[in-house]
Image (tube, rainbow, N blue to C red):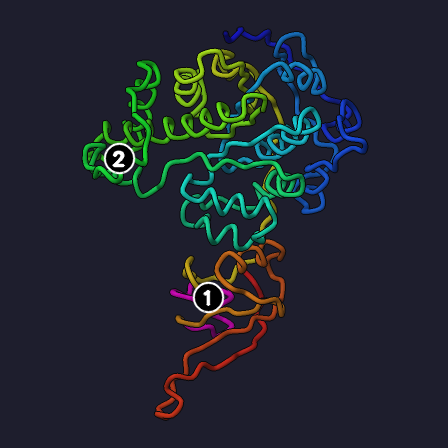
Amino acid sequence: MTTRLKPLVTSILAGLLLTISGGSMADTPLSSPLEQAAQQNLVTLPFNPEVVDFSQADDWQGLITHLTDYKVIFHGEIHNRLSDHLIQAELLHLMHQQTSELAVGVEWFQAPFQAWVDGYIAGHLDEGELLQRTEYFTRWRYDWRLLQPLMHYARDHQIRILALNAPAELTRQIAREGLESLSHEQRIQLPKIHPPHPEHEQRLKAFFGQNLAEHANTDNFIHAQRTWDETMATNAAAWLRANPNARMLVIAGQFHLDYQQAIIGDMLRQLPNLARQTLSLANGSFEEWQSDRFDGFLLTDELVLPAHGRIGSHITPQGQACLREIIANSAADWAGLQVGDCIVAFNHQPIRHFSDLMLALYETLPDQRVMVTLHRNNTSNQADRADEVDVIELELTLD
């Protein structure tokens, strides 16, 4: 049962980084994801959020001790908020110090791609292949640097990442045409979809009423939302049943977790005695939030991802990294790149596909000069060269 919180906010004066020295089950402390994030210039240490009292826990270490009693920790995120992802990575680190029987269920990967996620954690796929095989940049799209601290830590310590989400093809179809439009083959990919909790349904209707076009069918969008919730809940519950001694960190958007009426309610239908706690980050002061939305909150200053360099073109996300549109007056335009050019190397590092290129760009800064190697289809009128590809190497200054 969720207990209403006391509105007590306490600063963590030493910072999350300092907590790694206590309570470890390992012989030597595990490296902190926050250290990795600091090396990427994503955060300056110490990182000092404030913790709202969960129940006799008035600092971060007390919170971690309190959470030890719970099988599942749910973290409701704002998808593009860096502070959320740093907290998630550190939560994983500290939970891993308590037990090695652990998994992280995430919204950002879709269930049909689980094998590729497993391959990455096992070391069989590199980061670029993970992103390309899971179609990350077309299915989720958020800046991958947000997730790197957690994903790198999970890979380094062989912690299972569970791809919880429903296939986007199905949820898009449901949103457009309704649940009844699915074929039998499509429908059996999904769990039973129950009606939403009445209060959750009212919030969904209010949200969609403000954000959908007039001709859109609100019921279809609610069914799509419920498909996400039920699928993520069913996948998480199935893993917990198969691993009864394990713990789990579940990460999803706030709307999927707040008031324990969406994913959590669906999991409780399958696991009625599930011991859980929910937390999220609050914007601004605690007084702006209703304390029954989550079991507790963390407060932080707003953190912003540093800008990275950009080429200034639209690039095909599947297959080779080929330019399909050049933005006027961009780096690509000034350097003379052409539609159809395929980038095969960046600063002399091979580029296999779009994901490799994005990972390379994440390590650059605006206005940085870089070397790019292109393949360009031969456009001469010589018949014997019609199928040839020209290799072009040029320097450009990133946007």
Q: Is residue 331 magenta?
A: yes
Q: Over which residues does the magenta segment extend? A: 320-338
**Which one is in front in this view, the residue at disc 1 or the one at disc 2?**
2
342 to 284, vertically: above or below: below
| Amino acid type, mark 2 | Arg
Residue 112 lies, in percent from the top left, at 40, 42
- Identify the residue at horizontal 61%, vertical 23% (top origin): 299
- Identify the residue at horizontal 72%, vertical 19% (top origin): 61
| Amino acid type, mark 1 | Asn
Q: Quadrant of residue 32?
A: top right
336 to 159, vertically: above or below: below
Name the residue carrying label 2: 187
* Label 1 neighbour load within 10 Å: few <14, some 14-19, many 20+: few
Residue 325 lies, in percent from the top left, at 39, 65
Name the residue carrying label 1: 329
Q: Considering the image in quadrants, where does the C terminus appear? A: bottom right
Q: Secondary structure at mark 2?
A: helix
Name the side, left or right, on which 191 lies relative to 66. left
159 to 205, vertically: above or below: below
Please name whichever residue, 301 or 202, is drawn nearer the observer in this view of the structure. Answer: 202
Q: Secondary structure at mark 1?
A: loop
* Label 2 neighbour load within 10 Å: few <14, some 14-19, many 20+: some
- Identify the residue at horizontal 23%, vertical 32% (top origin): 179
Q: Earlier in the sequence, mark 1 or mark 2?
A: 2
207 to 326, vertically: above or below: above
Q: Quadrant of residue 192?
A: top left
Residue 211 lies, in percent from the top left, at 31, 32
